[in-house]
Amino acid sequence: MYHRIGEAVSDVWDIAVSASNFEEQLQVLKSTGRVISLPELVAGMHQKNMKPNRIALTFDDGYVDNFLTAKPLLEHYQIPATFFITSVNLGQHQEFWWDELEHLFLFTEQLPAYFSLKIQDTLLEYNLSGEAFLQEEQKRKHRKWKAFVQEPPTVRAQLFLDVWCHLRPLPAAEQQAQLQKIRDWLGVKPEVRAAYKSMTIKQLQELAQSDFCTIGAHTHNHAALAAHNRAYQTSELLENQRFLKETTGQEVNLLAYPYGNYNEDTFYAAADLHFYAGFTTEAQTVKPDLHPYGLGRFQVKNMNGAEFQNQLLTWESNS
Ligand SMILES: [Zn+2]
């Protein structure tokens, strides 16, 4: 499972792989001779006819670098991949809320000394007076911080994570309203970094036409599905599936849950929309006896070819 291919100032969720490391990883994958497309892998699973140790690549979210950087490399090495696309930002001059939030809290030079924000029933209050002005030392810590495995290294990082956790389950409109309050608190306008945009519609269409690329669903607004009722979940999936189908002219029957987040209602919603398979972010291999809507994936980190080769062996020995 990949997300972004490119450099990142900070990468707290460990989701950016540099273009040169990605190319080395593709060379390793090519040398295994075991990469197949995700549709092929899923078909084998449904037919209980899976060949051992096959590998399928996926990308989540629809970042523009998937088209600009990943697609040419995949075509060069003739390696197939499936792209799970969140549709809300396609062709829009906008970053995803989590990228903007990370950048605002971790890298704005001067913050007001006091932060106060009510998110649903919770009042978040922080005294930032010790860190209002961003020091080089904090910046360095923020660049290296990995939120899945490390405690927040600064108060700013703590605040970011706290707000992130409270925004994640909200409906998209509410996330945007809260983000606007944070921009107002900082006195800034939305800053859109080119590298954090989604693909344009035309780029998505070109991606879909490539012999090596399959398009999959990832909800319209990148919803944390389990936080919502079944009707909301269905509307997120349906809007996304319909949009991707109409835009690319392809059937969209593979699904990845944003944040790997799902519940029983998600399975019903996915079944209603005739998805063949649903993927989480749980680190486990695909086996024929698993529920087709609860399939795992391994997150590829920013490592070079040699490190990646070892990583593959570890994943295989877990299977
Ligand atoms: Zn995602």
Image (spheres, grey):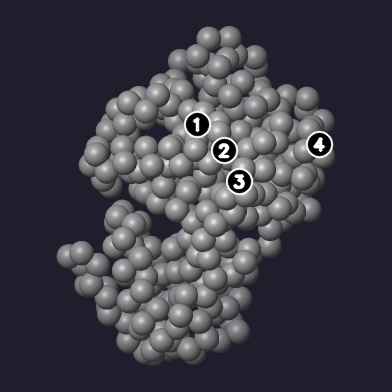
Taking the image as shown, residue 120 lies to the left or right of residue 55, namely left
Mark 3 element type: helix
Q: Residue at x 73, y 24 (%)?
A: 34
Mark number for residue 248? 2
Q: CA distance from mark 3 to mark 4?
A: 20 Å
The extreme left residue here reads: 121
Q: Residue at x 37, y 28 (%)?
A: 273
Of 259 and 157, nearer the camera is 259
Taking the image as shown, residue 288 lies to the left or right of residue 228, namely right
Mark 2 element type: helix
Please rate how many residues cluster around mark 3, counting C-alpha atoms within 10 Å: few if below 14, some from 14 to 19, many from 20: many
Q: CA distance from mark 1 to mark 4?
A: 25 Å
Q: Are marks 2 and 3 in contact (CB under 8 Å)?
A: yes
Q: CA distance from mark 1 to mark 3?
A: 13 Å
Q: Are marks 1 and 2 in contact (CB under 8 Å)?
A: yes
Give coordinates of residue 42: x percent, y percent. 54, 21
Q: CA distance from mark 2 to mark 3?
A: 7 Å
With respect to residue 45, does 201 lie above or below?
below
Of 114 and 42, nearer the camera is 42
Q: Which residue is mark 4?
A: 77
Residue 283 visible, this angle: no
Can you tell which quarter of the image residue 16 is in? bottom right
Q: How many marks?
A: 4
Q: Amino acid at mark 2?
A: Thr
Nearest to N terminus: mark 2 or mark 3: 3
Q: Which residue is mark 1?
A: 252
With respect to residue 99, does 51 lie above or below?
above
Q: Residue at x 24, y 67 (%)?
A: 119
Give coordinates of residue 94: x percent, y percent. 50, 65
Q: Amino acid at mark 4?
A: Tyr
Which label sits in the foreground, 4 or 2? 2
Q: CA distance from mark 1 to mark 2?
A: 9 Å
